[in-house]
Image (tube, rainbow, N blue to C red):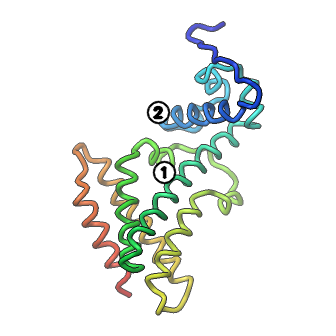
Amino acid sequence: MTEGFKRRTPSRWGEGGALKEEILVAAARMLMESGREGDLSLRAVAREVGISAPSVYLHFKDRAELVATVTRRAYERLVAQLREAGDRGGEGGPREALRAMARRYCHFALDNPKLYRLMFGIERIEGPRDELASHPLWTVHEVWVEAVSACRDDRTGAADDERVAKLLWFSLHGIVAMAVSMPFAASRQGMEEMADDLLDLALTK
């Protein structure tokens, strides 16, 4: 047994789901700490969980599948929060729903800096371009497009809605990136005000 290895208590029959969850949590933590997908290995994940390397292969065929699952879950969490914010803000109409979503996006990044980094700041292993269409980032894109379209229902052109949604999202990401890169505590109120200004600019046309 190697030094520092802590063997996990074996799962009982039917508890494979619990082990899979532990593997995903460990992989996410290691990715957030290293910041490099290339530094992650299934052997290292197995050691972190306290199992043998072959046990990981019972749940994930390779590192790519493990990383893809971790990434998808992170995006699903963001999508759920955006939809929740939109539903709550929707009582004031489509524009207020979108405003609530923009603010929640900023809060999500501040409240979950490591998770946000996992989604947008990890040094990735470059994959085939044809896999782009299936990347989970499009689930976030769809949420923004839906919300923008609801605010622009008197306009024509779905393509224009997508353009506005993309510009809004990318600009919000820029606000977040600037806020977290400074050596000072981020101002939530300041970020909300910038998000509001951005929203007003995005919907002026």
- Give the amino acid at mark 1: Phe
As drawn, the label of residue 120 is 1
Q: Where is residue 64, by image quadrant?
A: top right
- Give the amino acid at mark 2: Glu
- Given residues 85 and 172, the one toward you in this image is 85
For the point 74% across and 35% down, which residue is it?
59
Question: Residue 160 at what x, y percent from top left?
Answer: 51, 83
Q: How many marks?
A: 2
Q: Secondary structure at mark 2?
A: helix
For the point 31% across and 54% down, which residue is it?
178
For the point 58% across and 47% down, which residue is it?
71
For the point 68% across and 37% down, which residue is it?
63
Question: Residue 62 at what x, y percent from top left?
Answer: 73, 36
As drawn, the label of residue 33 is 2
128 left or right of 147 in image: right
Q: Where is residue 8, by image quadrant?
A: top right
92 left or right of 6 in image: left
Q: N-terminal of the two: label 1 or label 2?
A: 2
Q: Secondary structure at mark 1?
A: helix
As drawn, the label of residue 99 is none
Q: Residues within 10 Å of mark 2 (few under 14, many from 20)?
A: few
- Given residues 71 and 151, the one toward you in this image is 151
Name the quarter where the N terminus is drawn.
top right
- Given residues 146 and 39, the one toward you in this image is 146
Question: Residue 65 at what x, y percent from top left?
Answer: 70, 42
Q: Where is residue 2, by image quadrant?
A: top right
- Label 1 to label 2: alpha-carbon separation: 14 Å
Question: Residue 205 at what x, y percent from top left?
Answer: 38, 87
